[in-house]
Image: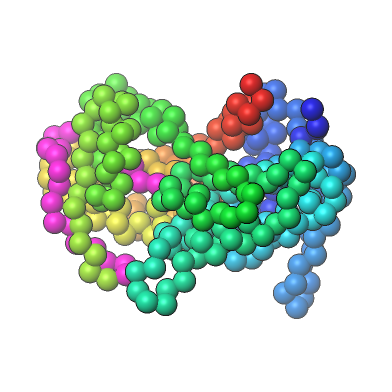
Amino acid sequence: MPQKIIFATQHYQYLKDRILSVPGTAWENGELEIRDFPDGEHYHRILSNVSNKEVILIGGTIDDKATLELYDLASGCIQLGAYSLTIIIPFFGYSTMERAVKYGEIVKAKTRAVLFSSLPNTSRGNRIVMIDLHVDGITWYFENDVRPVHLYAKDFVKDAAMELAAGKPFVLASTDAGRAKWVESLANDLHVPAAFVFKRRISGDETAITAISADVKDKTVIIYDDMIRTGGSLIHAAESYHDAGADNIYVITTHGIFAGNGFEKIKQSGLIKKIICTDTHPNALTIQDDMLVVKSVNELIVNYFHSQHS
């Protein structure tokens, strides 16, 4: 079996290091030389030998620069004779732009998928592994022979919920009806009630809550959402559960983006006691606050590879 070698884009070196720290992961640490030029161009050189090796490349498409860096590194590994290529995209950017609502809107979730689909195939083909996509259908946007894989961080959510509840009964809740089926599935696995709010969007960044689906009075409410960006929707939902009589409110999210001053807004609302998220987005690691607990997806990723060879 070919040797596995792992690389990461600049923003995701931390996750590469965490994956390599998992016991039993005897993967080679891929080395890169990266320089930025004054005119805004970027130099990348793959220092490690990738010929006839299983290349694992980690990088979230968190912005346009990071997306192109991931694409360039993938292209370089293929050109240098990689036996196989698995691109791990912990956070798939533009995942909320998965369909056009208004005429002329560009479906960027699809254009990003098409971009990575244009990579030439290695002899064993190319895989794209993504974690907790906002919409499962994004996997169908990939073309040619790319094999998209959607990993669910369900065990992370269940473990986090049990940790937050600390043995007490709780209601698993969502921020809106759009995530209701996913939250209901998790609630069934945990044998707890599910709740969700009905909301009406007023504008691009403003929503109004119209109803709550379950009784939360005097109960612990744990809200799950796949991502927190600015925190606006989360705060609105937390306000609704609080107004409906919820005792304590906690939050679990896979992707802690916390754009702008999102985390500070959530903290200042005074509604939420604690947030648990994963390290799929580097922004979560920049926040040093007891209110936020960040858990790694390193074992989820390693277990995926173990399952491929079991």
- Image location of residue 56, percent across then percent down: 70, 42
Nearest the camera: 166 or 254?
A: 254
Which residue sits at x=46%, y=37%? 152
For the question of whether residue 110 can be seen, the reply is: yes
Which residue sits at x=26%, y=40%? 173
Q: Quadrant of residue 156?
A: top left
Q: Is residue 304 above or below residue 138?
A: above
In terms of secondary structure, what is the magenta stretch mainly?
strand
Nearest the camera: 186 or 23?
A: 186
**51 part of magenta stretch:** no
Which residue sits at x=24%, y=65%? 201
- Image location of residue 102, percent across then percent down: 35, 74
What residue range appears in magenta?
204-226
Q: Quadrant of residue 205?
A: bottom left
52 vs 102, left or right, is right
Residue found at the far front of this picture: 144
**216 part of magenta stretch:** yes
